[in-house]
Image: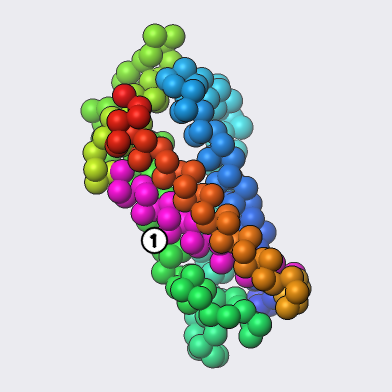
Amino acid sequence: MYLLKNSVGRKIIMSVTGFTMLTFVIVHLVGNASIYDGPDGINTYAAALHHNSTFLLAVRLTLLGFCSLHVFFGTLLTLRNNAAKPQGYAVNKSLSATFASKNMIWTGLLVAVFIIYHLLHFTFQVTNPEISAFKHLDAKGRHDVFTMIVLSFRHLFIALAYVCGVGILGLHLSHGIQSSIQTVGLNSRKIFPFILKSGMILWIIIFLGFSSFPIAILTGIFK
């Protein structure tokens, strides 16, 4: 209980939950990259996930719990920092203020909205039921996830929503990593520039990786 009430403990919880969700994002990106193998690639990947439904449910519940903790303690830390001094989100004096560091609470809220939309769109498939993979099967009798993705990202609004969403996600994660590493004390002047660059590189990888899917479909690479 002391860990939950202490500011350092709260930052540690933020770091652990943040790195866990970052790991999921990277694994999710790698899995989604199977779309470049065509319909069989992404449909095989989706079928493998759903054949392990118990494991998939456990992962989703764990992520939901971690995400809830992350949002809760992130909000508490932001309110505390704003009340005490205008330093921003879990950042000490050695960290130069950046757009990401000054807007973590807002990028976090936008990421939450994007995640909810993503779940409704591709996981529960309720926003565009006419192209739901639950209703269409491929030649091997599997849910046709490939066709659902292609038909979704042919819509300009949906494609732009995902490009903007993953851009904000990458921006949030880039500073979150920097802040988390600082929490464990790795914030010397020699190490921090490397951390700063690593966060930026990660943001670029996440943004380019995820946004490549809607862009490739919108431009006609996938049909």
The stretch of residues the image draws in magenta is 159-184
- Total marks shown come to 1
| Residue closer to the observer: 15 or 174 | 174
User: Can you see residue 173?
Assistant: yes
The image position of residue 76, as x and y in percent, is 53, 75
| Residue closer to the observer: 59 or 155 | 155
- The residue lying at 43 percent from left, 65 percent from top is 107
Q: Quadrant of residue 216?
A: top left
- The correct choice, above or below, for 213 with respect to 97 in the image is above
The image position of residue 116, as x and y in percent, is 39, 49
Report the predominant secondary structure element of the magenta stretch. Answer: helix
Q: Under tag 1, what secondary structure?
A: helix
**Relative horizontal placement of residue 19, taking residue 50 as reference (left or right):** right
- The residue lying at 42 percent from left, 41 percent from top is 212
The N terminus, quarter of image: bottom right
The image position of residue 103, as x and y in percent, is 45, 73
- The correct choice, above or below, for 71 with respect to 136 in the image is below
What amino acid is found at the position of numbered circle 1 in the picture?
Leu
Residue at the disc numbered 1: 110
The image position of residue 161, as x and y in percent, is 31, 50
Q: Quadrant of residue 152?
A: top left
What colouring method underlies this structural image?
rainbow
- The residue lying at 49 percent from left, 43 percent from top is 209
- The correct choice, above or below, for 77 with respect to 111 in the image is below
